Image (cartoon, grey):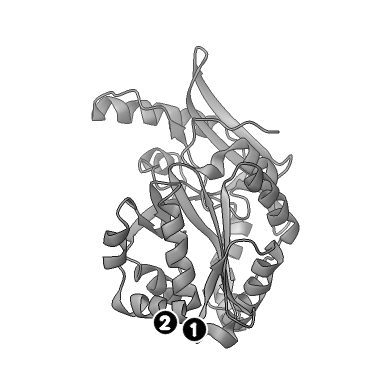
């Protein structure tokens, strides 16, 4: 079994997670001071349009640069971070395309800009303090509280259904949204085995009296954060309030295992509006790229092609 390590920003950076989602295709750069690791950056080898790049694997929101906190003053700490980031950049595979999402805690990205990387911003919604359930309930938008109360009259939340229930809901959700769904079931099944062995996941399903599944949500967690990794719902039953109830119960569960809750965000306006209604804080994280001309053009044209094909982006 691949060991867990303490010097990470999130569960996504654990060696066992990376081995599950990218077996044999991930690497890590570690900077040491003597025997002590003072900085670390994992990454995954991938291919896009037949071109090799390094980046973030499927089912993984972000990776990041973990840098040891030495307790130094801000000016000294930033200088230390700059030095570590420069060394990591220098040890990345040369002449390789890079497409990377950094953990939200990685805020100092100027060294990447100085080294010729392109920086853009993505957003997630996070509940940074989930210790007070009543405060969380009060923070919900009124229509979400109404949906939850309505759903409780006809639905129950089950946590003992198989992973196939989630796959079924994912298929229905992406079909309704006219989105291309990379349903890598083998990958998620492999990850699920690792998560179960570490008591690090929760699969919740909203089910009615006829045993119909209205919605399913898959949550992963460690002691720091619980993430809403993937989910879906039956579009024919979408008026039951199941998704609101499911997310609320996921948040309630998170209060028992973690300190924060991360919705994982979305750049799709309708999904962002829904997540925002749960009272979270919009939290930026950085998208860092260094692509050749072919990949740059393909990334430029991809959203335009999706729009022409009717996908939501």
Secondary structure under tag 1 reads helix
Answer above or below: position of 206 versus 52: below
Answer above or below: position of 131 versus 134: above
| Residue contact between numbered discs 1 and 2, judged by CB atoms under 8 Å | yes
Q: Quarter-wise, where is residue 184 in the image?
A: bottom right
Q: Is residue 55 visible?
A: yes
Residue positioned 42% across, 59% down in the render: 251
The residue that label 1 is drawn on is 240
- Depth check: 210 or 90 in front? 210
In this view, the residue farthest toward the top is 34
Say whether residue 18 is left or right of residue 247: right
- Depth check: 225 or 38 in front? 225
Residue positioned 58% across, 84% down in the render: 235
Q: Is residue 46 visible?
A: no
Secondary structure under tag 2 reads helix
- Depth check: 66 or 231 in front? 231
The residue that label 2 is drawn on is 150
Say whether residue 265 is left or right of residue 14: left
In the drawing, what numbered circle is on residue 73? none
**Residue 310 at x, y percent in the picture:** 58, 83
**Residue 59 at x, y percent in the picture:** 60, 55
Say whether residue 144 is left or right of residue 173: left
How packed mark 2 is, by other alpha carbons closer than 10 Å (few <14, some 14-19, many 20 or more), is: some
**Residue 86 at x, y percent in the picture:** 45, 31
**Quarter of the image that includes the N terminus:** top right
**Residue 244 at x, y percent in the picture:** 44, 73
């Amino acid at each position: 079994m691949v060991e867990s390590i303490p010097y990470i920003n999130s569960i996504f950076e654990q060696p066992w997670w990376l081995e599950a989602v990218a077996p044999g295709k991930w690497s890590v750069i570690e900077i040491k001071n003597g025997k002590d690791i003072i900085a670390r950056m994992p990454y995954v080898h991938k291919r896009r349009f037949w071109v090799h790049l390094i980046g973030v694997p499927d089912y993984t929101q972000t990776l990041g640069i973990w840098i040891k906190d030495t307790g130094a003053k801000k000016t000294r700490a930033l200088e230390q971070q700059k030095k570590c980031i420069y060394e990591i950049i220098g040890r990345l595979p040369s002449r390789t395309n890079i497409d990377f999402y950094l953990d939200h805690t990685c805020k100092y990205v100027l060294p990447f800009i100085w080294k010729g990387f392109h920086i853009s911003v993505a957003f997630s919604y996070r509940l940074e303090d989930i210790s007070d359930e009543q405060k969380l309930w009060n923070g919900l938008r009124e229509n979400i509280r109404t949906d939850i109360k309505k759903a409780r009259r006809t639905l129950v939340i089950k946590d003992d259904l198989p992973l196939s229930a989630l796959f079924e809901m994912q298929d229905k959700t992406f079909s309704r949204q006219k989105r291309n769904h990379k349903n890598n079931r083998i990958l998620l099944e492999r990850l699920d085995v690792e998560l179960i062995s570490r008591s690090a996941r929760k699969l919740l399903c909203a089910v009615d009296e006829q045993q119909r599944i209205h919605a399913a949500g898959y949550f992963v967690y460690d002691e720091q954060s619980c993430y809403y990794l993937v989910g879906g719902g039956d579009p024919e039953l979408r008026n039951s309030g199941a998704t609101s109830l499911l997310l609320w119960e996921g948040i309630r569960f998170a209060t028992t295992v973690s300190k924060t809750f991360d919705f994982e965000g979305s750049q799709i306006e309708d999904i962002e509006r829904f997540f925002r209604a749960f009272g979270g804080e919009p939290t930026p994280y950085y998208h860092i790229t260094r692509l050749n001309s072919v990949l740059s053009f393909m990334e430029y044209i991809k959203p335009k092609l999706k729009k022409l094909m009717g996908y939501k982006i």
